[in-house]
Image (spheres, rainbow, N blue to C red):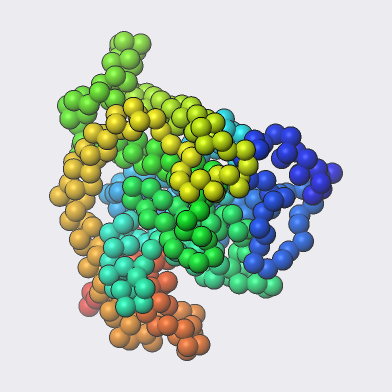
Amino acid sequence: MFNKISIKDIEYKLLAPFAMKSCNSRGRRYPEKEHPYRSSYQRDRDRIIHPAAFRRLEYKTQVFVNHEGDYYRTRLTHTLEVSQIARTIAFALRLNMDLVEAIALAHDLGHTPFGHSGEEALNKLMASEGGFNHNIQGLRVVDVLEERYPEFPGLNLTWELREGIVKHSSAFDKAGKIKEFATGEAPTLETQVVDIADEIAYDNHDLDDGLTSGLLNEEDLNKFPLWDEVCSRISKKYAKVAPHIRKYLIIRSLIDMQVTDLIRQTEENITEFKINSCVDVKKTGKKTASFSNAVIEMRKPLRELLMLKLYHHYRVVRMADKAKRFIQELFSLYVEKPDMLPAQIYKRINKKENKKRVVCDYIAGMTDRYALDEYKKLFDPYEKV
């Protein structure tokens, strides 16, 4: 049977010197006895996938609101895709795949309904209370809001996973600033890998969804060297393949090319930065996991196209604007009349918790569908409450 010593031996034998070993964790806020055959990061991963907050990701917007069609990515399918890509990278770099998977599965737990438009609305509404950041909200979810254990509040996750949630950063995500997690230190390599896996996933899968929706077309994409190069290679190898399969082959090849480049460049950075331990990773003060400059330049035009043609398409912008109005009106009503909140939520205000923060927590935890249903119940005179 496995025990704590054998888990330690396995990690030191298989993982790179700069990987984060579970036996070196800074631990949990509330001490717990270790499991006989699961590492602390394996337990973290298991604690992430069972709570309601994780299940709600199924009906939270990635780009297209759920009622647009069941083909498009949701926060849940996106999260699973990030996890798969991140595990592949972690295996190649000999990082702690359990920690990587746990961070990947948790990285979007603090997201609001309706994607980033929901976050923007709540950030504005909460300006007097310190604003809203979905990474910090993710930490609130796992530290406070999810109640599953009698011994402690939240999920009592390890320090490294909690840091990974707060310090998650990408083109669309700003790392949260909390004293417990020094802002001048780089996060673990495991966190950095999840950050870039997140970018790879949403860039390429948003291309996929954009093409399927008709908001993007291949004529636009063929102008860019990265797409054209991969497209030409696929067309030569599979001359008579069906168009929808050809699209999948192109997206898959784009992901593979970026993952391969990331692994190679990160290995070069590890050597250049003289990184021999997870402490060295933090002391660099900058990201060790990165693409090569050549791939960064090749990705730019495609990302700019996504911003212009997809994220700023009038259909997406209209839905984002509607979503902000839904959230603003729900927030104002709940703050003005908190007794309209569900009993278990209203109880928190009676316990002298900040009213706006309680309302913010409630709205941030909603799925798109629940928020729309709640809006109809409260503002449509013909809808049953």
The residue at the far left in this view is 314
Coordinates of residue 170 in the picture (x, y in percent):
38, 48
Residue 161 sits above or below residue 274 on the image: below
Left-right relation of 12 to 16: right
Query: Quadrant location of residue 341?
Result: bottom left
> On the rendered image, what quadrant is the N terminus found in?
top right
Query: Quadrant location of residue 147?
Result: bottom right
Coordinates of residue 262 in the picture (x, y in percent):
45, 31
Give the residue drawn at x 23%, y 44%: 307
Q: Nearer the viewer, residue 346 or 161?
A: 161
Coordinates of residue 144 in the picture (x, y in percent):
54, 71
Q: Nearer the viewer, residue 64 or 356?
A: 356
Coordinates of residue 272 in the picture (x, y in percent):
51, 32
Query: How many numbered marks have been drawn onto this rendered protein structure?
Result: 0
Give the residue drawn at x 34%, y 70%: 131
Give the residue drawn at x 31%, y 68%: 123
Residue 208 sits above or below residue 370 on the image: above
